[in-house]
Image (cartoon, rainbow, N blue to C red):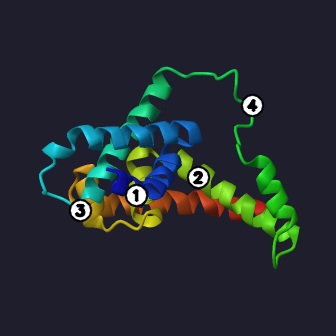
Amino acid sequence: VSILARRHSPGLLNYIYRIVRDREIAEALLQEVLIRIYRKGREYRRIAKVTTLLYKIATNLALNEIRNRRHHPQLSLNRPIDSSEEGGKQIMKLMSAEGEAPMRAMEHKDTGAVLQQALDELPEKYRVIVILCDIENFTYQEAAAVLELPPGTIGSRLARGKEYLSRKLAGYESGARE
């Protein structure tokens, strides 16, 4: 399990974070993934790659977290209203942007924020597939194994998700030019 944790934790954490959009929750869910692998590891039958199993567990936990949040919203009194944990670091990075003027770096940051917002607005059945296939570089077959869907469904949902993102970003582009 420690080898799996070292090898897959950074990618899994990034994947979970892209779904739940909260660093603390993503870290807690990653720990839960590793605990489940530790507890059930002996029962694992070599049907699919271990990576598929890890991402399947992570996907289920992350989606459950989102569903629970919808039904039971929570407010943390310890967290600042702007939950950007690295806000200060990002500002310093922008101010010292190597090879780019700070304004250009801000434009890239704004574009990334718009893209992330559009991704957040995708229905979860499209968002998870876009994250798996386009961001995590899973093949249709790997994503199909993780989500237990036919590869054709993965392809069509990925196309619909990309189409939705294109419409959202086209609206941003036309609004940015005005």
First-in-chain label (2 vs 4): 4
Q: Residue furthest front?
A: 2
Note whether residue 145 is visible: yes
Residue at disc 3, secondary structure: helix
Residue at disc 1, secondary structure: helix
Name the residue beneath numbered marker 2.
Answer: 118
First-in-chain label (4 vs 3): 4
Name the residue beneath numbered marker 1.
Answer: 8
Q: Residue at x 80, y 62 (%)?
A: 93
Note whether residue 153 is visible: no
Label 2 to label 1: alpha-carbon separation: 27 Å
Label 1 to label 4: alpha-carbon separation: 30 Å
Amino acid type shown at disc 2: Ala
First-in-chain label (2 vs 1): 1
Q: Nearer the viewer, mark 1 or mark 4?
A: 1
Amino acid type shown at disc 1: His
Q: Nearer the viewer, mark 1 or mark 3?
A: 1
Name the residue beneath numbered marker 4.
Answer: 80
CB contact under 8 Å: marks 4 and 3? no
Name the residue beneath numbered marker 3.
Answer: 151
Is 32 located above or below residue 10 in the figure?
A: above
Left-right relation of 121 to 42? right
Q: Position of residue 48 (x, y in %)?
A: 18, 59
